[in-house]
Amino acid sequence: MTIKEIYGMPNYAEIIDLISVEWPPEFGKKTDGEKIKQMQDHYNIKTDTVKYLLDAGKVIGFYRYTLWPRENPMSHAAHILDIAILPTYQNRGLGTRLMKDLIQDCRRKRINRLLSRSFKSNRGSIRLHQSLGFTQHMSTEDSIVWELDIEEKPEKSMRKEMC
């Protein structure tokens, strides 16, 4: 399996099954065309990063994150917008693999704070965030906003040597 960055506007029609997997009931019922249009309308070429998880050339997962706030292209914070794995590939650690790649990508771009949102009804998303060390930044009636400090810190042994 490989992870591939997508440059420019993704072809959302080719990943509609993934979009539908993650489309929360809280967003209401939409046709595939409406979902694709909404994804296109919310895509920002200057601040969004999209990567696909491929298995033998087939797209089986994806993620999208953006600088946060989007109006500041020099921001050192990012927000996860989407992360999804096709149902037949779930529960194999692939969501964790994608999230770890996303975190490493942020580090390479000198992003040191990562935010994400889970609906309280999405137990899988909540478990994923907790397993990777995200902490609850805030809570609303229907959602949890997560935060992760991803600034690289020296290892304990390095800190001892520096003392």
Image: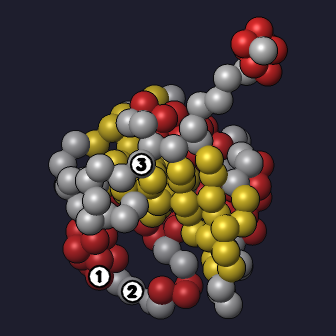
Q: Position of residue 12 (x, y in %)?
A: 28, 61
Q: Quote the CA–CA distance across marks 3 and 1.
A: 32 Å
- Find residue 30 and name its label: 2
Question: From the viewer's perspective, is residue 54 above or below residue 28?
Answer: above
- Find residue 76 and name its label: 3
Q: Quadrant of residue 92?
A: top right
Choose mark 3 or mark 1, whichever is in front: 3
Kindly identify the residue that appears in the image at 47 percent across and 90 percent down. Answer: 28
- Find residue 34 and name its label: 1
Residue type, label 2: Lys
Q: Quote the CA–CA distance across marks 3 and 2.
A: 34 Å
Label 3: how many Cα within 10 Å (few below 14, some 14–19, many 20+): some
The reply, left or right, for residue 123 in relation to residue 72 is right
User: Image quadrant for the C terminus?
Assistant: top right
Residue type, label 3: His
Asked if disc 2 and disc 1 are in contact, CB closer than 8 Å, the reply is yes
Kindly identify the residue that appears in the image at 42 percent across and 37 percent down. Answer: 110
Q: Position of residue 108 (x, y in %)?
A: 42, 31
Q: Nearer the viewer, residue 38 or 151?
A: 151
Kindly identify the residue that appears in the image at 45 percent across and 53 percent down. Answer: 77
Label 1 SS:
helix
Q: Position of residue 3 (x, y in %)?
A: 43, 33
Label 2 SS:
loop
Nearer-N-terminus badge (3/1): 1
Residue type, label 1: Glu
Q: Nearer the viewer, residue 158 or 52?
A: 158
Is residue 14 among what the camera can see?
no
